[in-house]
Amino acid sequence: MDFIIKNIKENIVSVARKIGYVIIDTKENNEYNLVRKLAGDNYPRFHVYVKQKLARHNAGALGGDNDFEFSLHLDQKKPVYKGQRAHSGEYFGPVVEEEADRIKEILTAHPV
């Protein structure tokens, strides 16, 4: 499930902490790989790719607001084949929608 939250005043580290996720990987183009475990094991877990963009209206402004693009899914289990990224993932449905709503509520009702 993809969604965007605009005009967040903090960086990805603060956002991840606020929504209960851990950054497990980063890329050069402001893309981040975050997870939130649902139990003591690594799976199942919510998994989200987040791209941080400086909001257009603040382009070039130091300390400006950020827009965050989220791509969320639920990993049910670890990939079966070594070296493969394929897994049993849910990209839509009530559980994923509830998690997306939870993230939106946290970041819009209580801005960071």
Image: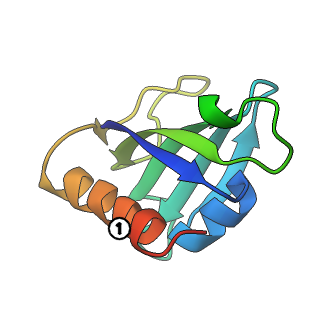
Up-down relation of residue 102 to residue 46 (above or below) = below
Would you say 65 lies left or right of 6 here? right
Is the residue marked by circle 1 packed among few (<14), some (14-19), or many (20+) residues within 10 Å?
Answer: few
The residue located at (57%, 41%) in the rendering is 67
Q: Position of residue 17 (x, y in %)?
A: 64, 70
Q: Is residue 55 visible?
A: no
Q: Position of residue 1 (x, y in %)?
A: 30, 37
Would you say 81 lies left or right of 44 here? right
Would you say 62 lies left or right of 97 here? right
- Considering the image in quadrants, where does the C terminus appear? bottom right
The image shows a total of numbered marks equal to 1
The residue located at (47%, 48%) in the rendering is 47
The residue located at (36%, 39%) in the rendering is 3
Residue type at mark 1? Glu
Which of 56/81 is in front?
56
**Colouring rule applied to residues:** rainbow
Question: In the image as oriented, which residue stretches furthest toward the right?
Answer: 62
The residue located at (32%, 54%) in the rendering is 100
Q: Position of residue 29 (x, y in %)?
A: 76, 24
Question: In the image as oriented, which residue stretches furthest toward the left?
Answer: 94
Q: Secondary structure at mark 1?
A: helix
Q: Is residue 57 visible?
A: yes
Which of 10/100 is in front?
10
Q: Which residue is mark 1?
A: 105
Q: Position of residue 36 (x, y in %)?
A: 50, 63
Up-down relation of residue 61 to residue 29 (above or below) = below
